[in-house]
Amino acid sequence: MVSCMSRGIRSIVALLCLVATHSSAGEYRRIASINLAADQLLLQLADRDRIVALSFLAADPELSPLSEEAAGIPGIRGSAEEILTLRPDLLLAGPHGHRHAVEFARRMGVAVIRVPVANSFEEAREILLQMGEVLDAERRARELVIDMDERLRALRLKAQAWDPAPEALAFGHGGYAQGTGTMMHAILEAAGLHNRARDLEIVHEKRMSLEELLLSPPRFLIATRYHPDNPTRGDQFVNHRALRHIEDRMHRLEIPLATVNASGNLSVEAAEALHEQAARHMP
């Protein structure tokens, strides 16, 4: 059963505790997910024969870091017909949206958990451990947390050589600067970079003008790579031809969107990639 004791993220624990009175963890043998972040958790924590479906995004390598593991598992959008056909005993949904699917599943007697999206490695750790209890995979969850913490610790040791930490600005695929309270901010800090958005008092995200960036460029500009044949607003911003005039002062780094978007503990891969790229431009 899930212990309803919070270690700092009450909302996460409260959501997961909702299911504790519904069923014991060992009873979940037909689990479906309709959320990308929940997909990643389920693929890491549950045996494949317990997974009856994942969200339709799980197999997209541009969005899902575990797309290869998701191959062959049915992808669904969360329609009532899909839930009726699959008859899961546990449905994982995101913190928002899919209201009709969630209500329908509950009316069918299906246990439902709305899984929060991790916006820091601390939240990723908490979600992993709590979901490990829900899915009867505590040992696997602890192993994943240990692996994440060891890799973050290794990054901190490497970044000690950078004093002060070089400034960086990261832009999401919507073209917004990523501020505090986002996983991107956590990734930048873990990589040993200082997020300029913190100094600008940007919380979550905010659109910045090209002029602002040109007048005061950070050392690194971080872009997220998505489908190359389908450029986003973020791509158009970070690839603007005007930025060529400051290439000698601002280096462009790039990480796959899949390692940032709804990845939780897997986002440590993004931090490692950023640190490695940034190190090539450091004295």
Image: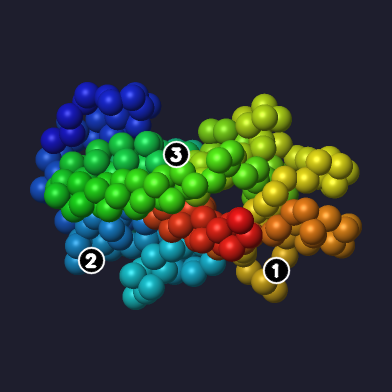
Residue wearing tag 2: 48
Real-space Cα separation, disc 3 to disc 2, in angstroms: 27 Å
Q: Secondary structure at mark 3?
A: loop
Q: Secondary structure at mark 1?
A: loop
Mark 1 is on which residue type? Asn
Q: Which mark is residue 120?
A: 3
Residue wearing tag 1: 230
In this image, 157 relative to 163: left or right? Answer: left
Of mark 3 and mark 2, the one earlier in the sequence is 2
Mark 3 is on which residue type? Ser
Of mark 1 and mark 3, the one earlier in the sequence is 3
Q: Secondary structure at mark 2?
A: helix
- The image quarter containing residue 5 is top left
- The image quarter containing residue 179 is top right
For image coordinates 12% across by 40% down, the residue present is 24
Of mark 2 and mark 1, the one earlier in the sequence is 2
For image coordinates 31% across by 37% down, the residue present is 126
Which is in the foreground here, disc 1 or disc 3? 3
Colour scheme employed for the rendering of this structure: rainbow
Q: Position of residue 91 (x, y in %)?
A: 31, 48
Q: Is residue 259 above or below residue 22?
A: below
In this image, 209 relative to 96: left or right? Answer: right
Q: Position of residue 158 (x, y in %)?
A: 43, 51
For image coordinates 70% across by 68% down, the residue present is 230
Real-space Cα separation, disc 2 to disc 1, in angstroms: 32 Å
The reply to whether discs 3 and 2 touch (Cβ–Cβ < 8 Å) is no
The reply to whether discs 1 and 3 touch (Cβ–Cβ < 8 Å) is no
The reply to whether discs 2 and 1 touch (Cβ–Cβ < 8 Å) is no
Mark 3: few, some, or many residues within 10 Å (few <14, many ≥20)?
some
For image coordinates 49% across by 47% down, the residue present is 161
